[in-house]
C-alpha cells in the first residue's frame, strides 16, 4: 500500500513539471497548477482558492462550484487522500525525514501532543487567515499553502526561468520544518489541508479503525507522521489516511487489528 | 560573443526590477482592477498558457499584487491570441472575451513631445528640417489593427482611435528611449505610472 502511495505521489510531482513543458510545446490539454487544474474540458480547483474568491467578491461563478465538486467528493468519501497521495510537500517532508534518519538526527517529536490542540491551532490559522484577507481584500492564503506555492513556482521556473518572491515564504516554512517543529506545515499551518478537513465527517467516509485490543507495541503511534494515536484518533480530522500506521501494525499479520473501514 | 557576455546577457534577462516598470497591464479580458484583485487566485494558468510568454507573474509589490499576472508592454505586448481568457477558473479574466477586436486592455496614447514623427513634422512645419530625422512609423507598422486602431494623420502623425485594444505591441516597438513615445493607459487602473498600484485602501473604498 505504501508503494502505491509513493507512486501516486511521484506521479503528481511529475505532473507539475510535465504540465508546463506540455504547455510550452503548445499542448493545452493539461493546464494549470495545484491551485486550479484543467484536464481537457474539466476544471478542478483547490477549494481554498475558490472559497477565498467567493468570500471576497461575493460573486459565484457556476464554473467555480463545479470545479471544487470533485475534490470535495473525494474528501467526503476517502478523507484527505490529497495530502497523503498527491501533495508534493508531503513527499518532501517524508524525504526530509528519511535524510534525517540516515544522518541519525532525532526529530523533535513530542508524542504527548494533544490532537485537539493541533486541530484548534489549524482552524485558528484558517480563521485568522480569512479575517486578514477580508481586511486586505486580496486572496493571499495561497502564500502559506506549500503545494500551491511549489506548483506555481514550478511554472515560473519552466516558463520564465525565474522565481517570484513566494519562494522566500516556502523556504522559511521548510526551515521551521527541518529545525524546529516536526511536520509544522501539515499539522498547524497549511490552509489547503485545513479547509479540506472541513469536509471530513465523523460518521462517514474511509477511516482507520482499531478493534480495541492489541499487543500494545505502539509501533503505529511511533510511525504516524501527524503524531496521532491511530488506535483512538482514526476519525480525527487531522488524519489524512496515509495508511503508514496500518502498514506498521504487526498484529495485522495474525488478525485484522488496525485497518481501513468505510463508515 | 564571449562566454562572459553570454552569462551577462542571461543574467540581464531576469527582470527583477519590475517594481518600477510602467506600461504594466492586466491580461485581456481582465475585469476592473478592484474585482480582479479579489477574484484572481494566482493560479498561474494564464501565465502558463500564453504561447508568447507575454504574461509575467508579479513579485511582492506595494499593495499585495504578489502572484498576479501582468503584461509589461515595453518588454512584449500581448499578441491577442485570446488563449488566456479561456482558462481563468474564477472569472478574473472574462471568458466572454474571445474575439481579439473586443479586447480592451487599455488604450494607447502618443506623447507628442518625444514622438519622432511629431518632431519631424514640427521641424518641417517650421522649415528647419535638416535631414537628420527620418520617418519612424514603427507603431503604425506593428499594430495588428492598423488603419482601424491607429492611423497616420497627414501621412505622418500617429493617431489612436477607440478601436485600440491596448495590446501594447506599438509600445514594444517604439524606438524612443528611455521613455516610450507611445504608452498604454490600462483600463481600470489609475494611470500609466500607477497601473497595478491601486492602493489597498482605495480598493476597499476607504480612500
Ligand atoms: S496539509 Fe497542506 S502541505 Fe500538508 S499534505 Fe496537506 S496540502 Fe500538503
Ligand atoms: S491574448 Fe495570447 S498573447 Fe495575449 S496575453 Fe493572452 S495568451 Fe498571451
Ligand atoms: S488564470 Fe485567472 S485566477 Fe489564474 S492567475 Fe490568471 S487571472 Fe489569476
Ligand atoms: S494602437 Fe494598435 S498596437 Fe497599439 S495598443 Fe492599440 S491595437 Fe495595440
Ligand atoms: S513608434 Fe514611437 S516614435 Fe515612432 S511614430 Fe510611433 S510613437 Fe512616434
Image (cartoon, coloured by chain):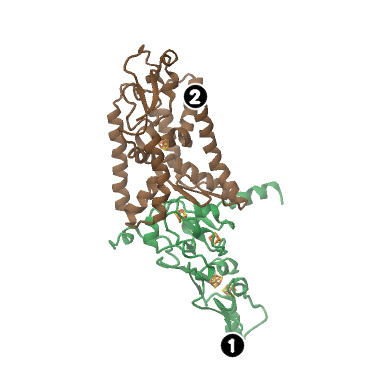
Q: Position of residue B22 (x, y in %)?
A: 48, 63
Q: Is residue A144 visible?
A: no
Output the letter for the chain in green: B
In the image, A213: left or right of B157? Answer: left
Q: Mark 2 and mark 1, same subunit?
A: no
Identify the residue shown where x is 57% and y is 67%. Answer: B169
Query: In this orientation, which residue lies closer to the viewer: B95 or A119?
Result: B95
Residue B75 occupies quadrant: bottom right
Q: Is residue A126 left or right of residue B110?
A: left
Callout count:
2
Instruction: Give the Cα separation between the discs numbered 2 and 1.
Output: 78 Å
- For mark 2, name the chain: A
Ligand 5 lies in quarter: bottom right
Chain A: drawing colour: brown
Please give the name of the residue rendered at 57% of the width and 65% of the height, measured from the top-left corner.
B172
Which residue sits at x=66%, y=82%?
Answer: B130
Position of residue A177 relative to residue B85, above or below, is above
Horizontal side of residue A17 vs B200, given as left or right = right
Query: Percent from the top left, x then y, of residue B166?
Result: 51, 69
B115 in relation to B80, above or below: below
Q: Quick one: B177 or B31, which is closer to the camera?
A: B31
Q: Nearer the viewer, residue A263 or B69?
A: A263
Residue for badge 2:
A98
- Can you give x and y, in whole percent of width and height, for residue A237 in the image? 33, 33
Residue position for label 1 = B125
Amino acid at each position: 500500500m505504501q508503494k502505491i502511495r509513493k507512486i501516486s505521489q511521484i506521479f503528481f510531482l511529475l505532473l507539475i513539471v510535465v504540465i508546463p513543458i506540455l504547455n510550452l510545446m503548445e499542448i493545452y490539454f493539461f493546464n494549470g497548477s495545484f491551485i486550479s487544474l484543467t484536464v481537457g474540458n474539466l476544471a478542478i480547483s483547490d477549494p481554498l482558492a475558490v472559497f477565498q474568491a467567493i468570500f471576497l467578491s461575493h460573486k459565484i461563478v457556476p464554473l467555480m462550484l463545479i470545479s471544487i465538486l470533485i475534490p470535495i467528493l473525494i474528501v467526503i468519501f476517502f478523507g484527505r487522500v490529497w495530502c497523503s497521495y498527491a501533495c508534493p510537500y508531503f513527499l518532501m517532508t517524508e524525504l526530509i525525514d528519511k535524510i534525517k534518519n540516515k544522518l541519525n538526527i532525532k526529530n523533535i517529536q513530542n508524542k504527548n501532543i494533544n490532537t485537539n490542540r493541533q486541530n484548534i491551532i489549524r482552524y485558528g490559522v484558517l480563521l485568522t487567515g480569512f479575517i486578514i484577507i477580508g481586511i486586505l481584500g486580496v486572496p493571499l492564503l495561497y502564500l502559506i499553502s506549500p503545494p500551491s506555492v511549489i506548483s506555481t513556482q514550478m511554472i515560473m521556473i519552466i516558463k520564465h526561468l525565474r522565481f517570484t518572491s513566494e519562494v522566500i515564504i516556502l523556504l522559511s516554512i521548510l526551515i521551521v520544518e527541518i529545525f524546529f517543529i516536526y511536520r509544522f506545515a501539515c499539522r498547524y499551518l497549511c490552509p489547503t489541508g485545513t479547509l479540506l478537513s472541513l469536509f471530513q465527517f465523523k460518521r462517514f467516509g474511509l477511516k482507520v479503525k482499531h478493534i480495541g485490543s492489541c499487543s500494545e507495541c505502539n509501533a503505529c503511534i511511533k510511525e504516524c507522521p501527524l503524531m496521532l494515536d491511530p488506535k483512538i484518533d482514526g476519525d480525527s480530522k487531522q488524519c489524512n489516511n496515509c495508511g503508514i500506521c496500518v502498514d506498521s501494525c504487526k498484529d495485522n499479520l495474525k488478525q485484522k487489528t488496525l485497518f481501513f473501514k468505510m463508515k | 560573443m564571449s562566454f562572459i557576455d553570454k552569462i551577462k546577457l542571461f543574467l540581464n534577462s531576469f527582470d527583477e526590477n519590475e517594481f518600477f516598470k510602467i506600461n504594466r497591464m492586466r491580461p485581456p479580458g481582465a475585469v476592473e482592477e478592484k474585482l480582479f484583485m479579489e477574484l484572481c487566485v494566482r493560479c498561474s494558468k494564464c501565465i502558463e498558457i500564453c504561447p508568447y510568454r507575454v504574461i509575467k507573474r508579479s513579485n511582492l509589490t506595494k499593495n499585495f499584487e504578489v502572484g498576479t499576472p501582468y503584461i509589461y508592454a515595453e518588454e512584449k505586448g500581448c499578441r491577442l491570441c485570446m488563449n488566456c481568457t479561456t482558462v481563468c477558473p474564477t472569472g478574473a479574466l472574462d471568458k466572454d472575451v474571445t474575439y481579439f477586436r473586443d479586447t480592451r486592455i487599455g488604450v494607447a496614447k502618443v506623447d507628442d513631445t518625444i514622438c519622432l514623427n511629431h518632431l519631424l513634422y514640427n521641424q518641417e512645419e517650421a522649415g528647419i528640417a535638416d535631414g537628420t530625422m527620418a520617418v519612424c512609423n514603427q507603431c503604425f507598422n506593428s499594430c495588428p489593427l492598423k488603419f482601424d486602431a491607429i492611423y497616420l494623420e497627414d501621412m505622418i502623425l500617429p493617431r489612436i482611435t477607440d478601436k485600440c485594444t491596448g495590446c501594447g505591441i506599438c509600445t514594444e516597438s517604439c524606438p524612443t528611449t528611455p521613455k516610450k513615445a507611445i504608452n498604454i493607459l490600462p483600463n481600470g487602473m489609475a494611470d500609466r505610472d500607477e497601473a497595478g498600484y491601486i492602493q489597498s485602501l482605495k480598493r476597499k473604498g476607504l480612500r
